Amino acid sequence: MNNRDRKSTTASEASDSPSQQARGERRRRTDVSFFIVMGGISSCFILLIVLLLLADLRFASLAEFKAALFKPEIQFAFQLTILSCTVAALLSIWVATPLGYLLSRYRFPGRTLIDTIVDIPIVLPPLVLGLSLLILFHQPFFGWEIEAWMRDTVGFPITYRWPAVVLAQFSVACAFAVRTMRVTFDQIDPRAEEVARTLGCTRGQAFLQIAFPQAWRGMIAATTIAWARALGEFGPILVFAGATRMRTEVLSTTVFLELSIGNLDAAVAVSLLMVAMAVLVLVVLRLLGTGLTS
Amino acid sequence: MIEIKDLSLRAGEFRLDHLSFTIQSGQYAVLMGKTGRGKTTILEAICGLRRVEAGQILIHGQEVTDWLPADREVGYVPQDLALFPTFTVRGHLEFALRLRKWSQTRIDRRTDELAHQLGIQHLLDRKIVGLSGGESQRVALGRALSFYPSVLLLDEPLSALDADTRNEMQELLKSLTELHDVTTLHITHNQEEAKALADCSYTLVISSLNPS
């Protein structure tokens, strides 16, 4: 502000013609205030996150961290988390690739509706999603119930077991994977696929031979994002799979269970473990350099 | 032979009605007209990438109006070339032949022959990233001609090239299309280019084609 005021005064004193003024002296405009204001506001958020992590680190002692990680319940939760997140992420990419491709390439009736439906798990409150899953599986449709059918006919009950964990994680993770795959295919020029079709490809061959090989970075990014979302999943798992130790306990449930019995040290130790896993995911995404992390 | 009979097309705001023209077998036809008159749209309709509203498209007497692009056996070189980013130059030349399930020896023979004709033998194992404008153009042309199409469609193939390269490519187009005996439809807005290449030329005035 000061600079600008000073400049305008000098200019009016020296001459009315800007060109004459420009010749006479060094210009003194500055961008410093811009960077101070923008940087100042931005750094508030960065500082908050860094302080959060530092506080966690300071709170936990190495001995407690080790003790917590050697508890059999937490080891079980760690294994179940890795497994369920991986299965949910693989299922997500399997669904997200075709869905992302369709949404990116085609304009069809109901496309906006489908686009909105895909986003529902992202905006739905997590507990509501869990409750909805529970209701879906136990609601009789003309006397036929999914859970009963899965348990009695297929022999693979879902609710309150590990498949419920995977399904709850998948419901949310897949939505994020679809978003990522859609952006991926949006960035791939459809012209190459069109030319491939004039050369003798069906749409399927053009997808598999031209679009698919270009999408691998996006697919790894989508899988990683899905995995990270699955890792953070808590609400739907609590409602749909329960929080039974050594059965349906994942790391996010562990934090909740340890907190609820007042074991703050173990809760923080597990939190730090999850922070480390999340950071690892971010590093993988950065290394891929997909530009999809933002 | 390409026959367009009473064709109507629409692309967004733009529309083209009652278009008819014929290009005899083996002829090199040049289609001229200002930007935005729908020249590209006509090419896309002929190769099957754009749905037509009414009318017929015949290739060598066979009506192909509702055929899939893959079934039409039309070589298409779009203005943006649309090369395949994950393929090598050889991959481009082999692509259509692999889809037609040619034997490897036949594919190799054809690829070598094409590379020789196009002067890109030294580029065969390169990825397309870093190819010059003229080189990319040759790859796109080779890809379109590889499977001996009966019809070749070229969308402003020389517009992005410098003057020297353009003259070179012009010669190459002339000789290659004669060698392959392919019916060619070439879009341009360059008069000299049209004069140098065309057996016959058309100018696209609003919604109709006038022989010029």
Image (spheres, coloured by chain):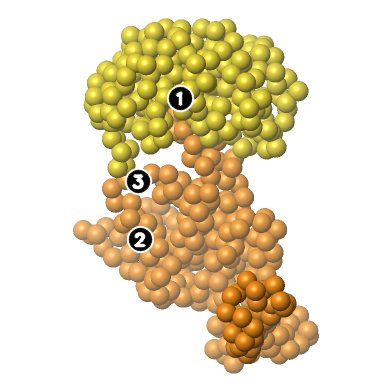
Residue under label 3: A107
| Callout in the foreground (1, 3) | 1
Residue under label 2: A116
Task: Rate crowding at label 3 as few (under 14), some (14 to 19) or many (20 or more) other CA atoms within 10 Å.
Answer: few
Whether pointer 1 and pointer 3 mark residues with C-beta atoms closer than 8 Å, the reply is no
Chain assignment, label 3? A
Residue A222 in picture, x, y percent from top left: 56, 56
Residue A171 in picture, x, y percent from top left: 44, 62
Up-down relation of residue B26 to residue A40 (above or below):
above
Residue A13 in picture, x, y percent from top left: 62, 87
The amino acid beneath tag 2 is Thr
| Callout in the foreground (1, 2) | 1
Q: What hue does chain B carry in this figure?
A: yellow
The amino acid beneath tag 3 is Arg
Whether pointer 1 and pointer 2 mark residues with C-beta atoms closer than 8 Å, the reply is no
Chain assignment, label 1? B
Given residues B126 and A267, the one toward you in this image is B126
Horizontal arrangement in the rendering, residue B72 relative to residue A224 (left or right):
left
Up-down relation of residue A244 to residue B107 (above or below):
below
Horizontal arrangement in the rendering, residue A254 relative to residue A176 (left or right):
right
Residue under label 1: B187
Q: Residue B53's quadrant in the figure?
A: top left
Query: Disc 3 to disc 2, how far (Cα)?
Result: 14 Å
Q: Secondary structure at mark 1?
A: strand
Horizontal arrangement in the rendering, residue B194 relative to residue B132 (left or right):
left
Q: Which chain is orange?
A: A
| Callout in the foreground (3, 2) | 3
Q: Secondary structure at mark 3?
A: loop
- Quarter of the N terminus of chain B within the rendering: top left
Residue most toward the left?
A142
Residue most toward the bottom?
A262
**Residue A153 visible in the picture:** yes
